[in-house]
Image (cartoon, grey):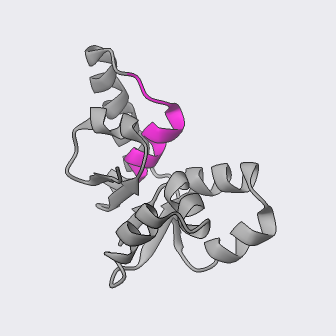
Amino acid sequence: MVVLDTNVIIDFLDGKQSVVEEVSKYANFEFATTFVNQYELLKYRKRSHLEDALKNIVIYHSSEAAVIASSNAYKILKEKGKIISDNDLLVFGVCLANNETLLTQDGDFKNLQSDSIIIIK
């Protein structure tokens, strides 16, 4: 499964060429997102349009393993002086806890130096 970050879902639905091409590379995979991304999407975008899209993908929720992974990532980044948002840390933790790959356009994730993150340029 591939976990889609908020920015990927928005730009895919808007038809952004680079995102559509990258997501298409994973056509044989099932898509997922996290409860954090669901919150961000429903908070900022037209709800009916996104609610339909969210019905077709798995939504991962938090767990003790996700919280531990998120807090560990925070500690590592803090030591390096490279803090990222709590939302991004939670998304990363959920992905790690579920052994999933995150597909994002957010360059802040590069600071996590993880093989389970793919950043669309």
The residue at the point 42 percent across, 49 percent down is 105
* Residue 25 place in picture, x, y as percent: 31, 75
* Residue 18 place in picture, x, y as percent: 41, 62
Residue 118 horizontal side relative to residue 90, left or right: left
**Which residue is outermost to the bottom?**
28
The answer, for residue 91, to whether it is visible in the render is yes
Q: Was residue 78 drawn as part of the magenta stretch in this picture?
A: no
The residue at the point 53 percent across, 39 percent down is 87
Magenta stretch: give its range: 83-94
The residue at the point 38 percent across, 34 percent down is 108
**Front residue of this view, candidates 85 and 18:** 18
Residue 62 horizontal side relative to residue 22, left or right: right
Q: Was residue 91 drawn as part of the magenta stretch in this picture?
A: yes
**Which residue is outermost to the front?**
17
Residue 74 horizontal side relative to residue 8, left or right: left
* Magenta stretch, overall SS: helix
Quadrant location of the N terminus in the rendered image: bottom left
**Front residue of this view, candidates 119 and 32:** 119
Q: Quadrant of residue 78?
A: top left
